[in-house]
Amino acid sequence: MTEEEIGHLLEKLDLRQKVRLLTGASNWRTHPEPALGLRALTFSDGPAGVRGVAWDERDTSLVLPSPSALAASWDEELVTELGGLLAEEARRKGVDVLLAPTLNLHRSPLGGRHFECFSEDPLLTGRTGAALVRGIQGGGVAATAKHFVANDAETDRLTVDVRVDERTLREVYLAPFEAAVEAGAWAVMSAYNRVNGYTMAAGPLLTEPLKGEWGFSGPVVSDWGAVRSLLDTARAAQDLAMPGPESPWADGLFAAVQQGLVPVARIDDKVRRLLRLADRVGALGERPVARRPLAAVAADGRGLLRRAVAAGTVLLRNEGGLLPLDPARLRSVAVIGPHATAVRIQGGGSAEVFPASVVPPLAGITAALDGSAEVTYVPGLPPDGRPRPLDRSWTRDPRDGEPGVLVRLLDADGTELHAEHRLSGRIVEPARLPGAETVEIRALIRPDRDGDWTLAVGGWGPVTLSVAGRTVLNGTFPLDSDDPTRVHVAPPYRSVRVGLTAGTEVEVVARRGLAPGTGVATVLAAAPPPGDPAAELAAAVAAARDADAAVVVVGTTEESESEGRDRDSLALPDGQDALVRAVARANPRTVVILNAGAPVTLPWRAEVPALLLAWFPGQEAGDGLADVLFGHTEPGGRLPTTWAAAREDVPVLRTRPEENSLVYAEGPYVGYRAWLRSGATPAYWFGHGLGYTTWSYDALEAPDRVGAGEPFDVRIRLRNTGTRRGREVVQLYLSEPEPSQAEPSQAESSGPEPSKAGSSGPEPVDPSARRLVGYTAVVAEPGEEVVAVVRVDGRAPARWSTERHRWEWTPGNYALYGGRSAGDLPLGGTITLSVTPPRSPGPTTESALH
Ligand code: BGC
């Protein structure tokens, strides 16, 4: 639709109709406007799958590896393909706008949503995010770049004021959003937090640079509930308040415009942007949407997910070439660790979706060996004592006897208004019925062991729990948070110990009063009695000793990695460190698989020969990991984030605000840039990851000179020195300049006059400072030599001047480093940046490369 046509549509609406469009009609939908042929737009989270409008375990979705794993692939083609799969899922579920990608950064490893963000580096984040945007939107579904901006931690996220200087914002935190807008993102979500005093839903950054300088033409959608006031948000470049139907805009915007407090032109611009979005996703008029054919993806979504597991898995260590394991030489494998069966496929919070099936590592390994070797499984640890929602494996619905639970809604007299069979004891959104005052979850449970079980009920407000007709818990739990995740998705549990007998079925009933303002979730959960840690460990050691190889799967818990809170520890919980150590001592052929969305400390890493980082690998976890373990596929991952050896070494750690401010005092020195500056050595550098072959880095060729703003190519020659075909991610880093005093800085043409270099611009050169400016992947056969051509964007050497509010290029010599991680850069070169582009193409020694 042309702008003119959209203008005509706008003219058909009166003020009341316009204002109505600017607040959601419900949690996930906007209002339709029949006068325009506009249907309601449907939104959904994102980003590891498409949940759809229901928070219901029966409404399943394909679950992708978490975003950190996607970034670890350093493979934009694959990410675009996965974006296509998300689009396909969105269309299957009637979703127009996917609330993804999350483009905040891994600033601190303690960040609770680390798994949901791509990387610590703005370039890798931006390129991966842009690739996902292209994939999603290629399928006719809108992507939403979120959370704009500086929502890099969860503590007090609704109110925290992030204090960050302009240069850092531009170069680091805004850069991925700029890349997403450049890739054509149709929507942007404003964050909950404040930046430099402004709440983001009313912040000036929505105007500049987002809509002005970057030319973003779609709507800014609020994070859920982030429009908390009327005039400041309405006057700002915030366009849509979600969810609805209640919002300060729904209540007061019409009157505010009538009173002249908000200009009509502001409202028109908001509606115009919403109509553009509607047109793009095919919700306006009868026009079909141009969509890329997705047949290949649709036919084999699970195959693509399996491939993605291997592509994002990072081989951190492989002493003596233990991996890949040769199935022909294995008679027995011991698989150890609770995560080998209860694998964590995704992180918690709004990103969560419900898989139709999950392949745990044990199942993947067993299937891959197909009876050729004996597979033994030992948990190695007793149950951790944390109650988990009841699941179908040991519960029955008392009414129909089917595996699962019975959920009922009762009125004030206890009369049943509604009853349904559910598959899980976690009911996030019960059916909404007038007159319903209580939600009840009822199940017959059959314990598999004697002892004191922990039974728990989750949810705010009045709750009770009864076992075999006896009330064992009764209380009221007052809401202590405004955070939507804590209120609606992950309420706290209250628990009680109850003695149960193995094999004897007993009825448990949880009830929660649906008092106003107490959120929607109710949970009935349980944990088995504590076991004997020494006996479990001994069993694991014995199994490892008797096997040809041991695979230990360890990881983080639901409690530690979730939206709505940050982590407080980097250690693996529950004695998993001791388990790894004991197994590695018992079997020299031990492979450790890490199932975590964010860095954990690995104090035993030098004691195990092979270490794979699988992240949260999505539903095809086990098959994808088995492909890697047995060498059907190379582990494709390279770290998108530096991993610390010890918590005290982490240069940027703090996520807790002080007096409501979180100061980004490190400036642009985030991630490996902070590590380089601090002089500390991490366990594994950003970019690190081994494949199944080896490489020699032989030569780096760059143009001698480039002009300011000119893109250039750096050619890196390398050779596959191993015995199998491999893929290598070739990375290029650039130093800070050594300015030549003779030449002035070059400013972006639109900016004010260039300044003299050295006058007030460049800071002193820090010899350790370097940052990623380009990367590409190459594939080579054994012995084959290849040239990786790494394209460097013309803006890469520029620096944002906070003083003059523009990009500036400092002329001078820049060191280039080529290699395989921020800490392993065997090749070097120099490039001279001049203010004027060179007359002829820069002299490269290209011929020497062929
Ligand atoms: C999260 C967003 C999410 C939204 C809707 C918010 O709490 O921060 O990422 O898209 O909820 O679920």
Image: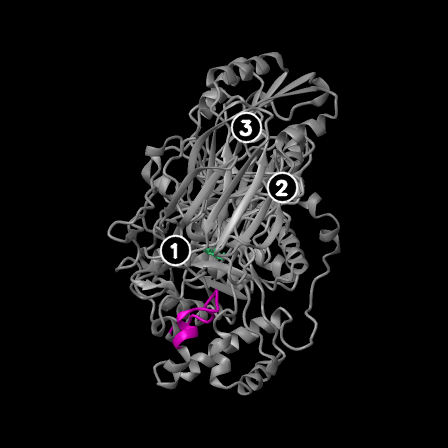
First-in-chain label (2 vs 1): 1
Rendered residue at 26%/59% (across/down): 760
Whether residue 843 appears in this view of the structure is no
Q: Residues within 10 Å of mark 2 (few under 14, many from 20)?
A: many
* Disc 1 to disc 3, C-alpha distance: 35 Å
Residue 573 appears in which quarter of the rendering? top left
The residue lying toward the viewer, choosing from 64 and 708, is 64
Pointer 1 with pointer 3, Cβ within 8 A: no
Tell us which disc is closer to us: 2 or 1: 2
Whether residue 756 appears in this view of the structure is yes
Rendered residue at 68%/45% (across/down): 304
Is 485 above or below relative to 186? above
Is 450 above or below relative to 201? above
The residue lying toward the viewer, choosing from 132 and 425, is 425
Q: Residues within 10 Å of mark 3 (few under 14, many from 20)?
A: many
The numbered disc on residue 338 is 3
The numbered disc on residue 641 is none
Q: Which residue in the protein does label 1 denote?
A: 150
Magenta residues, as a range?
236-252
- Residue 49 point in image, percent of width and height: 59, 51
Rendered residue at 67%/31% (across/down): 364
Q: Residues within 10 Å of mark 1 (few under 14, many from 20)?
A: many
Pointer 3 with pointer 2, Cβ within 8 A: no
Mark 3, secondary structure of its residue: helix
Amino acid type at image mark 1: Ala
- Is residue 499 a member of the stretch shown in magenta? no
Amino acid type at image mark 2: Asp
Report if the beta carbon of the residue with label 3 is closer than 8 angstroms to ligand 1.
no
The numbered disc on residue 397 is 2
* Disc 2 to disc 1, C-alpha distance: 46 Å
The residue lying toward the viewer, choosing from 449 and 648, is 449
Locate residue 532 relative to residue 676 in the image: left or right. Answer: right
